[in-house]
Structure formats: C-alpha cells, structure tokens
Amino acid sequence: GQNIDQPTEMTATEGAIVQINCTYQTSGFNGLFWYQQHAGEAPTFLSYNVLDGLEEKGRFSSFLSRSKGYSYLLLKELQMKDSASYLCAVRDGSNDYKLSFGAGTTVTVRA
Amino acid sequence: DAGVIQSPRHEVTEMGQEVTLRCKLISGHNSLFWYRQTMMRGLELLIYFNNNVPIDDSGMPEDRFSAKMPNASFSTLKIQPSEPRDSAVYFCASLGPSGNTIYFGEGSWLTVV
C-alpha cells in the first residue's frame, strides 16, 4: 500500500519562497512526481525525481531523498498565478506505471 | 498533438441512470488511466490499461463500475446504476512516450442527484 503525506494548506506572500514537503511510505519506489492543479482544472505535470538530489526547473525545484522517503517542492519568486493545489505522487514499481497521489497542498499567494 | 480529450465535460443525472464517460488518448500513447477526484478522498486510481489490456482494476469501487478500451485511442468508463456518492470529477490520463509523464484530460464533472 501507499502512504503519502503533505500539508493541507500553506499561505505565502507574492515574491516569497514556499517549500512544500512530502513524505511517503510505499511498498516499492520508482519515481516521485509533483503536479500542479488549479481550481476546476486538470493536474499538470511539474517535475519528476527518481534519483536523490535537486532538480531545478525555472522558479520550481524538486528534491528527493529516497532513504528518508522525503521530497519537497520549492516555489521561488511566488506569483499570484501560483495559487493552486500541489500534488505529490509516487510510482511504486519498475513495471507498474500507476501513480498514487497525496491529498494535495493548497497554496495561497497573497499580494 | 491534441491532448487527452474527455466527454462529457459536465453531466448531471438522476440516481439510477446509466452514465458513460469517454476518453480519447493522445496519439502514440498506449497506457490509459481513469482517476476519480473528490474533496474527501482526493485523486484515486480506478483502473489502468496498457496496450488496450486492463492491468490493474483494483481501484474500481464496485460492480456498478466498468471500463473498456476497445482500441488504442479510446476508452469508456460506465457507471450503472449511478448513485449520489458517485458524484466526482473523473479524469482520464495517458502516459507519455518517456514513461515518466502522465497527461490528464480536462475531466468529466459528474453530479448524481
């Protein structure tokens, strides 16, 4: 089974930095994903980590520590449009493409 | 390439009626996923197909739910009979060629009254 935990909500100011943590306990591991979902819309892919370390993609970075079962998504230079839900998802097997999602973290960016 | 296309986008139906949700995959993608999203339970995998074959349907809630993939680019999710607790957003998604990115459709917003 899968157990994926992330905070329910976070609030930050425009221009600031926010870090969304995700911890997981899974029967196997073959990658961790972050998705962004705006209200009323579909999730969209942000990042993928399968090895330990930091992956940077513009204002967004994602970090993974497999030994700790831990990841974070770092959002820098926050903009109002970054207000959304951020979903952590884990793929649990080398031949199994299905993703198990966390409940999501709602980030609210204030002016 | 067109994205994953779902229909209907919104449906309101009465309890007991049959509901059929449709999904067209991105060309060249051969794995398809049906997810359901509610406030209470978040995003749950219902079933996924690879090369038209159902690989894992352990997330299908009960016998009222069925899914088919008659060809490489199309799938249906059927609920018969529907119940109010089935009200949710149903997402179809496909796996990109790299095997590392799942692309979601816009979702079908179902309300059963």
Image (spheres, grey):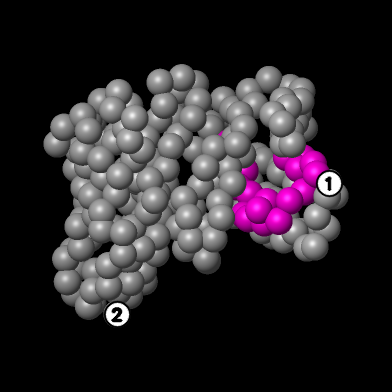
| Quadrant placement of the C terminus of chain A | bottom right
Circle on res. B113: 2
Q: In this picture, is A66 found above or below B12? A: above
- For the residue labelled by badge 2, is the local secondary structure a helix, a strand or a loop? loop
**B44 on left or right of B68:** right
Whole-number angstrom distance, CA of label 2 to CA of label 1: 43 Å
Q: Which residue is mark 1?
A: A17
Note whether residue A3 is visible: no
Query: Depth check: B76 or A27 in front?
Result: B76
Residue A47, picture quadrant: top right
Q: In this picture, is B15 found above or below B36? A: below
Q: Give the extent of the magenta segment.
A: A72-90
Residue B62, picture quadrant: bottom left
Chain of the residue on which disc 1 is drawn: A
Q: Residues within 10 Å of mark 2 (few under 14, many from 20)?
A: some
Residue A90, picture quadrant: top right
Tag 2 and tag 1, C-beta contact below 8 Å: no
Asked if the stretch drawn in magenta spans residue A39, the answer is no
Image position, residue A68 (x, y; %): 77, 32
Note whether residue B60 is visible: yes
> Mark 1 belongs to which amino acid?
Ile
Q: In this picture, is B19 found above or below A55? A: below
Q: Are marks 2 and 1 on the same chain?
A: no
Image position, residue A41 (x, y; %): 48, 55
> Mark 2 belongs to which amino acid?
Val
Q: Residues within 10 Å of mark 1 (few under 14, many from 20)?
A: some
Image position, residue A28 (x, y; %): 57, 29
Query: Depth check: A24 or B94 in front?
Result: B94
Query: Depth check: A93 or B67 in front?
Result: B67
Question: Residue at position x 57%, y 25% from top?
Answer: A30
